[in-house]
Amino acid sequence: MASKLAQLQSKACQASKFVAKHGSSYYRQLLEQNKHFIQEPATVEKCSELSKQLLYTRLASIPGRYETFWKEVDYAKTLLKNRADLKVEHAGIAALFGLECFAWYCAGEIVGRGFTFTGYYP
């Protein structure tokens, strides 16, 4: 166990050194490639305008999402009506999907509790 811990510590140290050495050049390259997305000067008014654009863009996408949701519900209903045609593979995929949703729920609960397993902070 101690050898695994030392090995993990060594890998973490190597990763940290790599990021320290190449991180700033990657950051500069990323900004250079995406400079057409950067708003200059970054004023409060511009940030407010961009946040409103994002909000209303998200609101405008709700009808499409709503329609897609009901299509998915109809598909699930037809699957339940035709249970005899359901294959083991489809049932397995559905079970794995449900398990994944539950795992994400549990992870969210743990994060929401402040990374504790026993309870919430007061």
Image: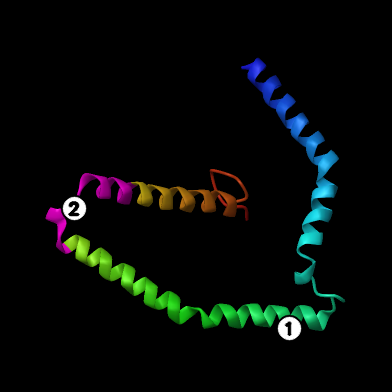
Report x, y in % for residue 89.
26, 45
The residue segment tinted magenta is: 81-95
Secondary structure of the residue carrying numbered label 1: helix
Q: In the image, is 22 to the left or to the right of 7?
A: right
Q: Is residue 86 magenta?
A: yes
The residue that appears at 85% across and 48% down in the rendered structure is 24
Amino acid on which disc 2 is placed? Leu
Indicate whether 87 appears above or below 53.
above
Report x, y in % for residue 95.
31, 48
The residue that appears at 80% across and 74% down in the rendered structure is 39
Secondary structure of the residue carrying numbered label 2: loop
Report x, y in % for residue 53.
66, 82
Amino acid on which disc 1 is placed? Glu
Could you classify mark 2 by the number of other residues whose Cα lies within 10 Å: few (under 14), some (14-19), or many (20 or more)? few
The residue that appears at 68% across and 26% down in the rendered structure is 8
Q: In the image, is 13 to the left or to the right of 120?
A: right
Residue position marked by numbered label 1 in the rendering: 49
Report x, y in % for residue 3.
66, 15
The residue that appears at 37% across and 71% down in the rendered structure is 69
Q: Is residue 84 magenta?
A: yes
Residue position marked by numbered label 2 in the rendering: 86
